[in-house]
Amino acid sequence: MTTLIKGGQVLSTTGASLADVLVDGEKIVAVAAPGVFTEADEVIDAAGKYVLPGGIDAHTHMEMPFGGTHSVDTFGTGTTAAAWGGTTTIIDFAVQAKGTSVLSTLDKWHEKAGGNCAIDYGFHMIISDVNDTSLKEMEACIDGGVTSFKMFMAYPGVFYSTDGEILLAMQKARETGSTIMMHAENGIAIDQLAAQAYAAGRIEPVHHSLTRPPELEGEATSRAITLAKVTGSPLYIVHLSASQALAAVAEARNEGQNVFAETCPQYLYLSIEDMKKPYFEGSKYVASPPLREKSHQTDLWKGLRTNDLSVVSTDHCPFCFKDQKELGRGDFRAIPNGMPGVEHRMDLLHQGVVAGEISLGRWVETCSTTPARMFGLYPQKGVIAPGSDADIVIYDPAARQRISAETHHMNVDYSAYEGLEITGKVETVLSRGRVVVSPSGFSGSTTHGKFLSRGLNQYLN
């Protein structure tokens, strides 16, 4: 079947150009001047709209176990919500528990996701138990298309790795060309501060942020960068939230080190003030790293413009307010860490375009093209070009919408951006040539998505 998308402004990392896009089956076969192609099995009029490559959310947690519960979006509900928001690929995390096999963990996540995704998906692997076996299994993961490995400097007793364990994994990454992803917070010091706060009766949600100060994110980021420099490993800092951490990343990049970082919409738009909301409402905003003072937002937007922040992901990890976030009433340390966001990333970053914080090209770059290159999917994904998958979003830049839990499609009972009025809206989404979202609604299927076997980071020196 052929589809012609005509009359739209086709976006790339260099900006916009008026062009028509011809799709045949699952692939883009031509991008041509308007009017070159006149016939197709289906014609979509994109006049006045943007036509951009489908978004790639490189950091999600569907069905993730955490703190005695689990994130409430299944692969089915989460990828459907992603599609509604213009994201056509997610990269989720398989979570190795201590004492378990890396490869058996990967098998479990394949079972969870296989046949249950509305869009294409890949995996990163969380390594929480570093030993000779797991280091060897990293090689088998790479052979299976899982080429990035996340580690934690936070959560002692759960995911935490010592500097020595991190060094061993980084040496393996250097050997194989894979990338280490790092949750960079000083978890040992944070746990002491949190225990002291609780003992002093400071139990409200805001103390989740106050006991995870930005200095401890900056310190851990610097330490991870140093370990990466010693080992020669590529390093990708996940969900960077603080000016101190960004400064460390910028310095390393200026020195030519293979250090990369992402931030998330919540750190660009929300702040510690949201965590102070009464009646335990602040628990809705508990995530790690935590929301910061608003002053950090200026630096993060600057980091996106300068490419010291290369990617915007969501860290989508939704827990319902009722019965899940409420587990932390009386002890902020028991609030499940995570926020919903996979549906609104593309819209929220478009607000950065509207506000003059980033360009159209940078919007496409941070949300689609760079994650494709960073995680070995380009040019299959992340670009509108002949031969690429027909993952295409038709976006109305003039539409107005109001974000609300009443209208979102994520399987969670609140919105972190409740009531926010924004400009721009996804109109139509194609996943590998199939229209999955249109003005008439969702027409996709949770059996449509395919596993993506990824290559290595394409930015390595």
Image (spheres, rainbow, N blue to C red):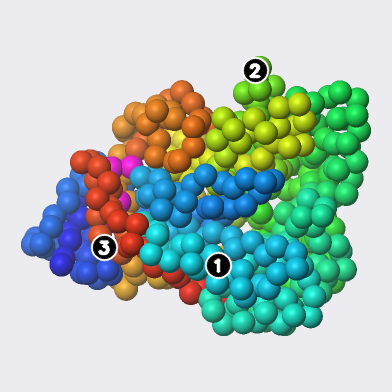
Place residue 49 in its image quadrant: top left
Q: Compute the Cα span from label 3 to label 2.
A: 46 Å
Q: Amino acid at mark 1?
A: Lys
Q: Is residue 154 visible?
A: no
Q: Which badge, 3 or 1, is on the more N-terminal residue? A: 1
**414 or 172: which is nearer to us?**
414
Q: Amino acid at mark 2?
A: Tyr
**Dot 1 alpha-carbon crowd within 10 angstroms: few under 14, some 14 to 19, many 20 or more:** few
Query: What is the x, y in percent for residue 425?
Result: 34, 38
Q: Compute the Cα span from label 1 to label 2.
A: 38 Å
**Dot 2 alpha-carbon crowd within 10 angstroms: few under 14, some 14 to 19, many 20 or more:** few
Please give the residue where the numbered disc 3 appears in the rendered image. 433
Please give the residue where the numbered disc 1 appears in the rendered image. 108
**Is 112 above or below relative to 277?**
below
Please give the residue where the numbered disc 2 appears in the rendered image. 279
Q: Is residue 188 magenta?
A: no
Q: Kindly identify which numbered label has been placed on residue 45.
A: none
Quarter of the picture holding the C terminus: bottom right
